[in-house]
Image (cartoon, rainbow, N blue to C red):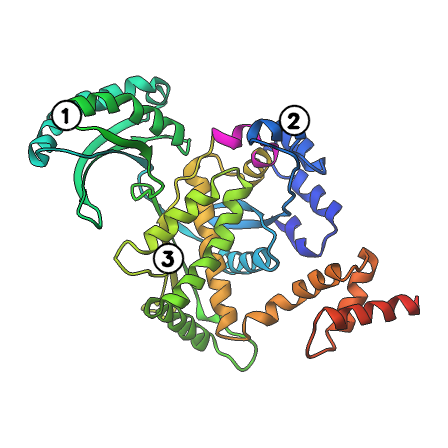
Amino acid sequence: MSHFKGFYKKTYLERLHILQELPNLSEKTQHTLQEKCSLSYETANTIIENFFHVYGIPMGIVPNILIDGNIFHAPLATEEPSVIAAANFGAQLITRSGGFTTISHQRIMIGQIALYHVNNIDNTIHKLMLHKDDLIKDANLAYPSIVKRGGGAKDLRVECKYSLDNTAFLIVYLLVDTQEAMGANILNTMLEAITPKIEKLSHAPALMSILSNYATESLISVSCQIPCALLAKGEHTSGNTVRDHIILAYQLATADVYRATTHNKGIMNGISAVVLATGNDTRAIEAGAHAYASHTGTYFPLTTWSKTENGDLKGSITLPLPIGFVGGSISIHPSAQMAQNLSQTTSAKELSSLIASIGLAQNFSALRALVTDGIQKGHMALQLKSLALTVGAELHEIEPLIQQLKQEKNINQEIAKNYLEKLRQNI
């Protein structure tokens, strides 16, 4: 969409006008775009306990992302400077290279019922599996509306796990297709409904019945391929060099957990921002992603980077993304509904693809910066803006103060305050 050209140079009001021109926007979205604080105190008071204030987080957008032949826009809610700029740079370059390709695995959530003091584990497993179909049927009877929508409990597994002190837990795993919902309430309702029958069959007490945020049956993979011609950095750093150094940076993350942790944190900068903007559970997604990074027994990067046969740079990301498109705070938070509408996604699978694509784009931009100019150069302009605000600059003083600060090699608050005082004396 050409009207997004130079979007970052536009004023706040000009950006609003561009967003209002997007197709298929609801009247509610149009209204929310105009609101300074879309979450009313009355609504906020119903969402959490002991409510007293609404904490504002800026929301930006990465427009025109090509995913599987369709254009989407990613809303990001974040307080961290440079996150949106980096995601935008990576997403636009990858879009120019042909876009993102997604492989969406099945969207199945997992819940567990943990039994203890089980007398004969093998016999109990056998007995529970004999009643598997009945237990699945009972689970579905506990939440018939999800069955009507094509979802519901699909499978049941039983495994024995041992704790550090060798305590045995017999764990019943219930696998549920939650359709467009994230599914926490669905899972927990089903699990609690079948727990008494499982206790009776096993002659053992249940310690707890709860969904798991380790959504290994709700994985999504996204890949991209970038020609070396688009990777060159100025006249002195060739595309081949940038490609090879990005691959080396990925290899470093596979070798060193200190680097892998920061590598994945950068990925989650983008992912968590879209998750938050769309009313999903950032803590659940973060926990599941980092658990999946360790699924081999070693903490690894969530992305991979390699060279194709024709010399292109190929990137991919795989992680669990049990994203909800309905339910929870999505249904009551106006900003979440607006963000979903602006994204132009129409399903949980499309939204998951968009979120994973942002994570991959974010990682590409970070690695490219690290192996070329360093991370600070790209961050500097936004850091200077934050510094200007910190020392008390008014809106009309920010740009001239930034220009003064750019002339300094070492910048701190004291220097910024001195420049601001001089600026005010000269007005």
Label 3: element kind: loop
**Residue at the disc numbered 3:** 302
The residue shown at (25%, 23%) is 194
Q: Is 136 situated left or right of 32 in this image?
A: left
Magenta span of residues: 327-336
Q: Is residue 98 visible?
A: no
Q: In which quarter of the image is the C terminus?
A: bottom right
Q: Position of residue 127 (x, y in %)?
A: 10, 27
User: Do labels 3 and 2 touch, CB within 8 Å?
Assistant: no
Reading the chain from its start, which is encountered first: label 1 or label 2? 2
Give the mark toward the camera: 1 or 2.
1
Mark 1, mark 3: which one is toward the viewer? 1
The residue to which callout 1 is attached is 203
Nearer to the camera, 220 or 163: 163
Up the image or down, 62 lies above or below 193; here it is: below
Q: Where is residue 246 in the image (x, y as percent from the top left)?
A: 42, 70
> Is 225 on the left or on the right of 217, as rendered?
right
Viewer-proximal residue, 48 or 3?
A: 48
Q: Earlier in the sequence, mark 1 or mark 3?
A: 1
The disc, 3 or 2, on the residue closer to the chain's N-terminal end is 2
Q: Where is residue 279 in the image (x, y as percent from the top left)?
A: 52, 37
Q: Is residue 334 magenta?
A: yes
Residue 131 higher or lower than 110, as above or below:
above
Q: Name the residue under label 2.
A: 42
* 193 lies above or below 371: above
* Main SS class of the magenta portion in the image: helix
**Numbered label attached to residue 403:** none
Residue displayed at 76% across by 69% down: 416
Going by the numbered disc 1, the residue's amino acid type is His
